[in-house]
Image (cartoon, coloured by chain):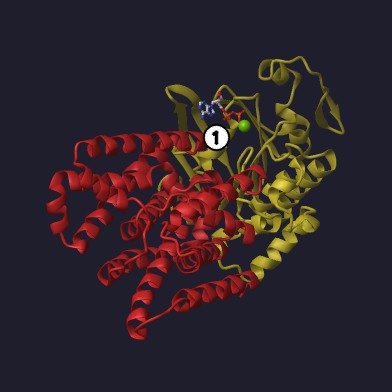
Amino acid sequence: MISIRGVKHSIQGKPILQDINLDLPRGGVTALIGPNGAGKSTLLSLIARLQPLGTGTIRVDALQIGSCSDAALARVLAIMPQSAQISARLRVGEAVMMGRYPWHRGRPGKRDGEIVEETLRLFSLTSLADRFLDEISGGQRQRAMVAMAYAQETDYLLLDEPLNNLDIAASRHLMRLLRQMADTGRKSIVIVLHDINYAAAFADRVVVMREGRIVADGAPGAVITPALMADVFETDAKVHLVDDRPVVLV
Amino acid sequence: MDRRLALLCGLLALSCVAFMLLGAVGSWEFLLQFRLRRLAALLLVGICLSTATVLFQTIAGNRILTPSLIGFDALYILILTAMVQVLGLAGFAAIPAPVIFAINLAAMTALGMLLFGVLMFGAKGDMIKLVLTGIVAGILIRSLTEFLQRMIDPSEFQMIQAASFARFTHVDTGLLVLTAAASLPALALTWRVRFRLDVLALGSELATGLGENPQRGRKQVLALICVLVASATALAGPSGLFGLIVTALAYLVAPGTRHAVTLPTAALVGCIVLVAGQTVMERVLDLSTPLPVVVELLGGLVFLFLVLKRHIR
Ligand SMILES: Nc1ncnc2c1ncn2[C@@H]1O[C@H](COP(=O)(O)OP(=O)(O)O)[C@@H](O)[C@H]1O
Ligand SMILES: [Mg+2]
């Protein structure tokens, strides 16, 4: 379980997150939604110790963020940061193999090779394995970044807007894959989504943030309502039920 | 082993043989010993500078940087000038060479750590800021040096000038041993952390996600860089753009990013450029121009070409 207690965060005196309390039990897909600048990426990066945590505590299973070993956490939790930029000139296959680093520490074994191959296949990247990351399309690169986090084979997977740049087929494919990981692999997936309809279709739980606070939390059907669209997103989009699932009309 | 590495090894062996045997006249025993010492110095300096530049580019996240570009060479001349200034030429000459070497090494390592530490952590991963502040720091150090040099007499000034170029004309065994003692452990450590370097090269966020603390990693690598550049410079003098040229060539030969490949490739290329270059300069062209001047001239052109052709990123 990821357990967040009393987390506050500010940058140069400006409050970014306030009084965040959240429990994310093991297993399932949790979607984090909210307007731009709500603090979703900040929250994710605090959980994954990408930024130092000031006030409050975050625990991932038995590991306490801030005091646990970085290497130990890397075997339990993987993150794909928003707009992750790789500065090194890497091939797709090499990047996915880097995702295995917490396990092989630089000396990949046979099993690592198999996992990388399987991951490349799952993300339809096999034919791109030998291409450099800066020589493929934005969507392909995004897929490679998700694949890298996926190959890390952690119980917790945090993805910050992984559908950016993906076409509809790739988006649905990825969301199905995550769904399957949660259902059959007992993985916990926390995913920041831009498109509320994807959250409604694939998540078990939707957490809504606004101005650094959690303002709604629950099953998609209960949370995604016209009132939410008006209050949180400040737009008058209609919400219809299609197959018992809320759909936001854009 | 990789075919390209094998080829580079062959080229280096050839250069070494040429360096040892070309134009050999007189007593074999003396000549062999004399040249062997110089060869060892060339190889050591070549490996140290190439390795340091690869490390520097890894933590800076950029392949067109080299420690001397942001003021390391200037630091060396400043230390030299300050010593002459404080002690006077006679006093300076009276100090045994190993002591000067040790002072140089220690001062450069310490000041280098300070300089790069401040620059790197001040720039917070902003490359442009790092380069600009680095260049300004270099100018500041140079002006300070010039200011000190104006206060000393011309003969002392000349002595410093002579020491301001890399030189391999005469190599003292004692200094060679000292250099090796300082740099070999640093090189061994670098090789040991080669996989961690691959992770650090991914950038802060991804490195953290994979369980490597980038801040700690950068500090450790910074220490390695300072020791390597300081030992090479204390032995042979400032190296200018040498590291940059070598890594640019190395990336052309081996375009990947794995340090297990780039480190030995860069080291081999560095040694080839130094040994072959020195051989050609001395024995074929019979010139006494210091090699770095030529490397810089040719290398500068090669480098401009590479940058403009976008072969380097
Ligand atoms: N490095 C930073 N410096 C200053 N403000 C920042 C920085 N990063 C994020 N912020 C601010 O923090 C708030 C939350 O940002 P973020 O977590 O990225 O939002 P989201 O991912 O929900 O769009 C925004 O108001 C943003 O302007
Ligand atoms: Mg965001």
In this rendering, the answer to whether A115 lies above or below A31 is below
Residue depicted at x 69% and y 49%:
A133
Residue type (three-letter) at the residue carrying disc 1: Leu
| Chain A display color | yellow
Q: Which chain is red?
A: B
Q: Position of residue B180 (x, y in %)?
A: 33, 68
Q: Is residue A208 left or right of residue A245?
A: left
Residue depicted at x 65% and y 53%:
A90
In this rendering, the answer to whether B304 lies above or below B178 is above
Q: Position of residue B106 (x, y in %)?
A: 25, 54
Quarter of the rendering occupied by the N terminus of chain B: bottom right
Q: Position of residue A142 (x, y in %)?
A: 71, 44
Residue depicted at x 80% and y 53%:
A124
Would residue B313 be seen by someone viewing this image from the given angle? no
The quarter of the image that holds ligand 1 is top right
Q: Nearer the viewer, residue B293 or A230?
A: B293
